[in-house]
Amino acid sequence: MNEPPSAIVQEASAAERVVVLKVRAPGRTSWVIVGVAGTTASTGLLPPEARKERWGGRLPPGSRRQRSREDALVGAHVLGIGKNEIRIDQRGQIRSVRALSGRIVVTDVMDPDAPPAFTLLDEESRARLEAAGIALVDALATSAIDVVRSEITRSLDKARTKISRRREAVRGDLQKIAEANDIASRASWFIAEAKRASRGANKLVVTDWSTGEPLPIEIALDPAKSASEQVEAMFKRAKRLRLGAQIAESRLAQTEAQLAAVTEAIAHVAEATSLPAMREAAHQAKKAAPRDVALPDAQTTEDGRTRAAKKQSTSGRRTPYRTFFARSGRKLLVGKGAADNDTLTLKVSRPHDLWLHAKDRVGAHVIAPLDKGQTCSSEDLVDAAHLAAHFSDARDEKNVDVQYTHRKYVRKPKGSGPGFVLVDREKVLVLRIDPGLLRDLLSREDETL
């Protein structure tokens, strides 16, 4: 009896609950799937684009690739495909890819009856298996939505708690300012009483007649110090707190807006019925509160640069730049030192990115990533220029010249020192520093990398 034609695994994608194999047989390439959706395990065939259309990639969102398993499966021969197992010849050993205890394993445990030979399936059987495969992909996509929803919601809940605590702290600062103002309003009374206080007094008591009724007001003293000095110190502290009131009120408004954005995102994620809708809600929350919202990896790797940074971070290598968010949400990269400036400018950035530096100053290189053909908005330019000025020896000046150009016009002379570059076709922005804008930018540092 002739052996059926060989069907070899050319490519494997594997996670805990699903395995997809690209199988090549004479005259035909097939995608074979075995997976667990809920408590049900099944197998099937897939059209080439089914995964991308429903998952957006090779595996369901949130899956952790099992690369060692993928490597082990490549080169195996597919012998047959049954209801809930794929039978393979793995280097001369007959094994089964199937579900056990709610996950996919490669095991010697097999169904008693051998499944139909894979290469001998007729078109009717293949059509039936393809329908089963599509149903499995859809079920896994639905399950993935729930997994991703849970991960994003957990992250946003942490952010909401963190922001709520910060809001209460700012409210506490404003309460202290109000109390300081209350004390300062009675300055003349306490000053006069302090002059009459005996050495070693532990409190001062005055009477407030502003309401027409006598109201005793008391402040505690340190007996070891002069009463007049302590009262004067209280009023100086009250003055400092009053000067900080505007900043505190601005911080409170910002915190309230961030809390509202994160709370709104949580509601949108709970109602979303698709992965793109959840990702968009999460992105808006991250844009509003970049320091507080640390999204799951699948939601934060938006481009090649971010993925590379993640890979670099997890491999134990330091990142040569700090990341801030402009008011628009655009990432702005700031070199950490002279050698890091070279790495950021010459290796990380791309020719069409925007490069900035405080002109004729020692300072950080700043990169505003741009898509090819994209121009930098005036708002993003001002934000990036503020960072270039701040991370330079001109940081305490009110007006700073900042040079900028596309990265392709920046070159490093041979043999020059760390961080030294020459710039062609530069433009210069005369920047008037906005302290409030700078504080906001510095508060938007991304510390998740």
Image (tube, helix red, strand yellow):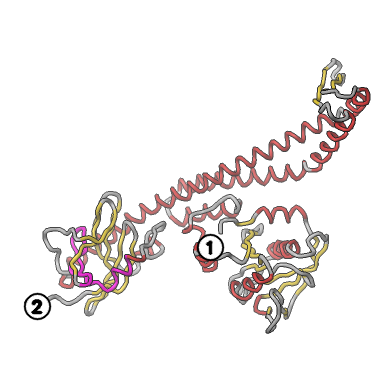
Relative side of 394 to 87, left or right: right
Residue at point 66%, 67% (across, down): 335
Residue 21 position within the rendered picture, expressed as x and y whole percent measured from the top left:
29, 68
Query: Within the magenta stretch, is there residue 56?
Result: no
Kind of residue at badge 1:
Ser
Check the picture and name the quadrant holding the N terminus.
bottom left
Question: Callout 1: 10 Å neighbours few (<14), some, many (20+)?
Answer: some
Which element carries disc 2, helix, strand or loop? loop
Q: Quadrant of residue 20?
A: bottom left
Would residue 357 be found to the left or right of residue 116 on screen?
right
In-front residue for pair 140/439: 439
- Extreme residue in the bottom direction: 414
Name the residue: 36% across, 52% down: 143
What numbered label is drawn on residue 313? 1
196 to the left or right of 399: right
Residue that lies at the very extreme toward the top in this rendered image: 213
Give the residue pinned by disc 2: 2
CB of mark 1 within 8 Å of CB of mark 2?
A: no
The spot of residue 296 in percent (x, y) is: 48, 55
Q: What segment carries the magenta color?
A: 69-91
